[in-house]
Image (spheres, rainbow, N blue to C red):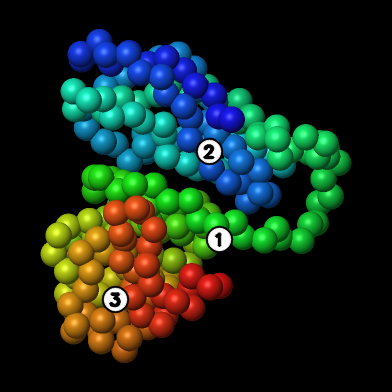
């Protein structure tokens, strides 16, 4: 069970009980950000502040996860305070009797990949977060904001990969796919496209020609492969 903290909205004074979300560490241990009393209203989103470093108490791996937030009924977005530099507690029901970090061998076979855990998409930021979580689930680490801003949407980057997330209601066009592919070529990276509204027929054909995997983000936050390249990537 993840921990819960009482939260009071500074705008309307409404009280909430917030439970920290749980994410799967690469070692397979469920972890959650360590919360502490305190909350502030988010007036505008800053990319660097939207992520928090969480350390697994079992294997010691440090990963970036979305900063805990809660939407109040009055419309205020509340950012929950997180204890800095404290290892996140692992789920005791799964880690009881497990070896301590010092007992874990330096080289271990990779555990089977767990089922992807989506987040519901309600805002454009949710779409970006869902895409980032999916890329981590595929094995890409150190997801960050891309250096070059795409013509539309948000650019994400990892080692050897460039991704574009388009949260608009307009289907992606062939030009959108071409711009992503050209930018990735200049950085000697692979690329992948996530769209909330899908793609035109011409955009799909251009992506197949250029070798760009296409995904559609459904409102549950689960990316759905659109072409064979995306199918191959999700199965890797």
Compute the Cα span from label 3 to label 1: 24 Å
Position of 85 compared to 204: left or right? right
Q: Residue at x 30, y 66 (%)?
A: 216
**In the rendered image, which quarter is residue 45 located in?**
top left
Check disc 3 and report its element: helix, strand or loop: helix
Can you give x and y, in whole percent of width and height, for residue 134 in the image?
A: 45, 57
Q: Residue at x 66, y 34 (%)?
A: 90
Dot label at residue 139: 1
Dot 2: what SS? loop
Q: Mark 3 or mark 2, which has the lower sequence index?
A: 2
Q: Distance between the residues labelled 3 and 2?
A: 37 Å
Question: Can you name the residue that lies furthest to the top here?
Answer: 13
Residue found 46% across the figure and 59% down from its top: 135
- Residue under label 2, please give it: 22
Numbered disc 1: secondary structure: loop
Vertical comparison of 36 with 163: above or below: above
For the residues bearing labels 3 and 2, Cβ distance under 8 angstroms:
no
In the figure, is residue 204 to the left or right of 58?
A: left
Q: Nearer the viewer, residue 177 or 127?
A: 127
Query: Quadrant of residue 204 in the image?
Result: bottom left
Q: Nearer the viewer, mark 1 or mark 2?
A: 2
Disc 3 marks which residue?
Answer: 182
**Quadrant in which the C terminus is drawn:** bottom right
10 Å neighbourhood of mark 3: few (<14), some, or many (≥20)? few
Is residue 108 at all visible to an observer of this figure? Answer: yes
* Category of crowding for the residue at label 1, using alpha-carbon neighbours closer than 10 angstroms: few (below 14), some (14–19), many (at least 20): few
Kindly report which numbered mark, 3 or 1, lies closer to the viewer in this rendering. 1
Q: Where is residue 12 in the image (x, y as percent from the top left)?
A: 20, 13
């Amino acid at each position: 069970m993840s921990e819960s903290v009482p939260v009071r909205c500074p705008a309307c004074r409404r009280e909430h009980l917030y439970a920290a979300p749980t994410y799967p560490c690469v070692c397979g241990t469920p972890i959650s950000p360590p919360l502490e009393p305190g909350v502030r209203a988010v007036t505008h989103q800053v990319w660097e502040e939207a992520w928090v470093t969480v350390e697994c108490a079992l294997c010691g791996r440090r990963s970036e996860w979305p900063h805990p937030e809660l939407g109040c009924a009055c419309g205020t977005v509340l950012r929950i305070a997180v204890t800095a530099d404290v290892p996140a507690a692992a789920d005791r029901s799964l880690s009881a009797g497990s070896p301590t970090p010092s007992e874990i061998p330096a080289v271990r076979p990779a555990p089977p990949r767990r089922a992807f855990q989506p987040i519901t998409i309600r805002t454009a930021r949710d779409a970006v977060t869902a895409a980032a979580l999916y890329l981590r689930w595929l094995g890409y680490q150190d997801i960050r904001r891309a250096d070059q801003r795409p013509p539309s949407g948000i650019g994400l980057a990892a080692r050897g990969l460039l991704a574009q997330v388009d949260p608009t209601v307009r289907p992606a066009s062939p030009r959108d796919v071409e711009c992503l592919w050209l930018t990735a070529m200049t950085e000697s990276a692979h690329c992948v496209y996530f769209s909330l509204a899908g793609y035109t027929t011409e955009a799909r054909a251009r992506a197949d020609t250029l070798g760009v995997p296409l995904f559609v983000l459904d409102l549950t936050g689960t990316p759905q492969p659109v072409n064979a390249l995306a199918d191959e990537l999700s199965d890797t």
